[in-house]
Amino acid sequence: MMNRVILLDKRPIGTPTLNDFKFIEEEKPTAKNGEILLKALFVSVDPYLRGRMSDAKSYVPPFELHKPISSGMIAEVIASENADFKVGSHVSGLLEWKEFQVSTGKGLNKVDGTKVGLSAYLGILGMTGLTAYLGLTEIGKPKEGETLVVSGAAGAVGSVVGQIGKVLGCRVVGLAGTDEKVEMLKKDFGYDEVINYKTTKDISKAIKNAAPNGVDVYFDNVGGEISDAVLANINNFARVPVCGAISLYNDTEIAKGPRLQPIIVKNSVLMQGFIVSNYAAKFPEAIQKMATWLKDGKLAHQETIVEGFDQIPQAFLDLFEGKNKGKMIVKI
Amino acid sequence: MMNRVILLDKRPIGTPTLNDFKFIEEEKPTAKNGEILLKALFVSVDPYLRGRMSDAKSYVPPFELHKPISSGMIAEVIASENADFKVGSHVSGLLEWKEFQVSTGKGLNKVDGTKVGLSAYLGILGMTGLTAYLGLTEIGKPKEGETLVVSGAAGAVGSVVGQIGKVLGCRVVGLAGTDEKVEMLKKDFGYDEVINYKTTKDISKAIKNAAPNGVDVYFDNVGGEISDAVLANINNFARVPVCGAISLYNDTEIAKGPRLQPIIVKNSVLMQGFIVSNYAAKFPEAIQKMATWLKDGKLAHQETIVEGFDQIPQAFLDLFEGKNKGKMIVKI
């Protein structure tokens, strides 16, 4: 029996294309002593993977060329030579884009799909939910009554950030790229105001109207011109968790924009870049909090689920077109 | 007897000129009940005053047009109708650019010129010394063995930051604009390496050579291209106190440069703008620390003293040409 695998075939230049990936077939592996055999069920595709496809220095090492790509995945244990993992149980972790793979179990977490759908462990109870919660609470530190602005608001992280902002008593303003997303954020996620940045001429003015008391916390998922517009409305002592810069990831030259130092110094602004693993010590506490809010109906979660192993590369490419609402997941 | 006064006559456009200031004469005031009469001895001129000459929103309200300018000053009490202030004693505080003025004494600090020169209270034991100490320790948080880079290193703040960095056990690299300043920083202030940014072609490469382990703390006094070059060498988890942006203060259009978000997020960088008054609660502790280091010979202090009341505007303009070494002060 054969096993399909997705390799990184070329390092993308600018916006990645399907040509940068290659499907191969290899023999299906078997679990040896201490190992488990895993069948992929759900694959997470995330903007940060773009960085690993380049060979530039970054916080995660680059993917190797002509080797399998890896990302967050949920898998089922279908054979086990390891007493810690029962056949039929489910795990989450950083796994390779293969239909089947063996593992020692190291670095994998057992997950329980009976209370929430298994895919939630790739989103709201996984990396993106933790990113939202920890970036907002550890850096943004929103206080009741403050105004929180979120860019990439309909994305996997942004859609959770806004909801946590509401739980914490903030006025929450989002930026998203389609009217459908704007509606979803207002109706399903409790955003107070959402601006369609693609159809709004003067984004800075729109933010001023939506945030009449100025911006106290700006959760930045995108960088670029949207961030310029938000920072033009920033308050004294504002906090800016810098979570991602999806608008800049595919640039082939270094993008230029207004220099930030005058705004930062005039307003005593704090900007702090982060990746979720910086706060690994707080994961258990954060997951517990998120799970409680989810159970109590205080958080909704939105997934865009694409079906089929062969659709993984396209689902990844679609992130940069903003085709996802909430977490983009491929179901195998 | 007449009293000379310097007014803001025009709001500068771009780089200020002498035409933006106006000298007038008015009658010398007298101290009434509860007041003291002050004679100006030393006047501090500082880059941040440029911001107050514009009417843009900032952390300090703009100067009023056709009214006296004010800055940090040391004055002698020459007449007193207030039992708290003796004739012949000295005070520091925010005072107006006048040869003589009356005050209730509110907001003034008594200073003692017997152990250090009075002008030190405008520099190393005053606002600029506090700015250096508190920006570095509260935001930069340098650890022993780390590399600290300081721009505007020969300025009033920068020359102190580097010395504190040495006291705290850092490798200290400075950027300054003349060979004379480079020599001074190495010889008198203990900088390990200093780069002349005006004569160095590839500043980023020069920083890479001077900071082979990368930059852990960047104390940014200047903004602009120098900061781009430092940030290109920034380490994971680096801290960047953003103290000023003198290279950008006279711009008439918003300066553009490489977007910072990708660097900030890739390296989990913290950038924090501040003004010294954010840390007012820590002033007593900071002054005590600085005074001890000064007494123990661990800190040198450098002043550029210009003489004459009529030289105040020119001394201010000279800041933007980098004509000062250390604190720029006008002696009356």
Image (tube, coloured by chain):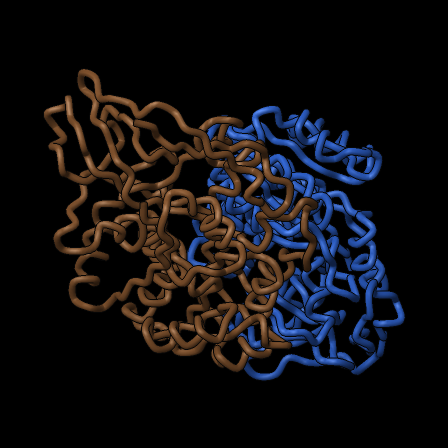
Chain colours: A brown, B blue
| Residue occupying the point 74% across, 69% down | B97
Q: Nearer the viewer, residue B282 or B122?
A: B282
**Position of residue B4 measured from the top left corner of the image (x, y, whole percent):** 81, 74
| Residue occupying the point 49% across, 58% down | A220
Q: Left or right? Give the position of B128 relative to B204.
A: left
Q: Left or right? Give the position of B20 relative to B329.
A: right
Report the residue that reaches farthest toward the top.
Answer: A33
**Position of residue B31 measured from the top left corner of the image (x, y, whole percent):** 64, 79
| Residue occupying the point 35% across, 56% down | A305
**Where does the C terminus of chain A fall, quadrant-wise?**
top left
Q: Is residue A246 above or below residue A181?
A: above
Report the residue that reaches farthest toward the right.
Answer: B19
**Where does the N terminus of chain A fall, quadrant-wise?**
top left
Is residue B195 at all visible to an observer of this figure?
yes
Q: Left or right? Give the position of A19 relative to A297.
A: right
Q: Left or right? Give the position of A89 relative to B283.
A: left
